[in-house]
Amino acid sequence: MGTSKGVLLSGVALIIGFYTVGIKKTDRMTAEMAETRANELQSENIAQSGVRLAINELVVSNFATNSSKSLDLLGGTISYTITSSSGSAHITSTGQFSGRTVKVIADVQQTPTQPTKSRGNMWQISKMYVQPS
């Protein structure tokens, strides 16, 4: 009778061990997926910051012609390109963070208000989307 109890307890301990290993593996996979998603979101935020910087460049420079810049921001890198024509501009911004790259494309229009010394030209986003990677 004592041997059967030992075998039963060993079996229960083995099952609990398998559950513990499975739970730890699932936790590790969940943490990896969360980190990957967080890096993608940070890349997208950096790319959207590039769009805002490009719009700021349009405002400050009083309608910048074609230009591109690259700079480090928030632990990642922004690269943006402005292609402009009369009253509108096309902005392509790429954000890179922790091995992830996201591209945001925006079309902006100059608003009909007259530029002022303090505000410059005003620009409005007419279309913006994240390009699938």
Image (spheres, rainbow, N blue to C red):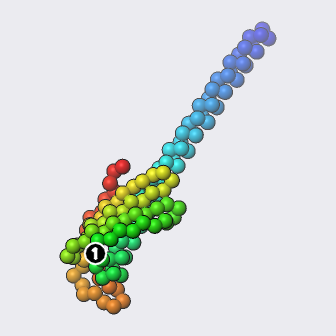
Q: Quadrant of the N terminus?
A: top right
Give left or right: position of 119 versus 10: left
In the displayed image of the protein, which residue is found farthest to the left?
86
* Residue occupying the far right of the picture: 2
Q: Position of residue 88 (x, y in %)?
A: 23, 72
Q: Residues within 10 Å of mark 1 (few under 14, many from 20)?
A: some
Callout 1 amino acid: Thr
Q: Is residue 74 above or below residue 28?
A: below
**Residue in view at x 32 percent, y 85 percent:** 120
Name the foreground residue: 38 vs 2: 38
Where on the picture, by quarter, is residue 91? bottom left
Q: Is residue 95 above or below residue 5?
A: below
Q: Secondary structure at mark 1?
A: loop
How many numbered marks have been drawn onto this rendered protein structure?
1
Q: Measuring 24% from the left and 79% from the top, which residue is drawn there?
A: 111
Horizontal side of residue 41 vs 91, given as left or right = right
The residue located at (34%, 50%) in the rendering is: 132
Q: Is residue 80 visible?
A: yes
Residue 126 position within the rendered picture, expressed as x and y whole percent measured from the top left: 25, 68
Question: Which residue lies most toward the top here?
Answer: 1
Q: Which of these two is toward me, 92 or 16?
A: 92
Q: Position of residue 129 (x, y in %)?
A: 31, 59
* Residue 125 in sight in this render: no
Residue 19, x across and y down, in percent:
62, 29
Q: What residue sits 61% from the left and 36% below the top? A: 24
Q: For mark 1, what is the residue?
A: 65
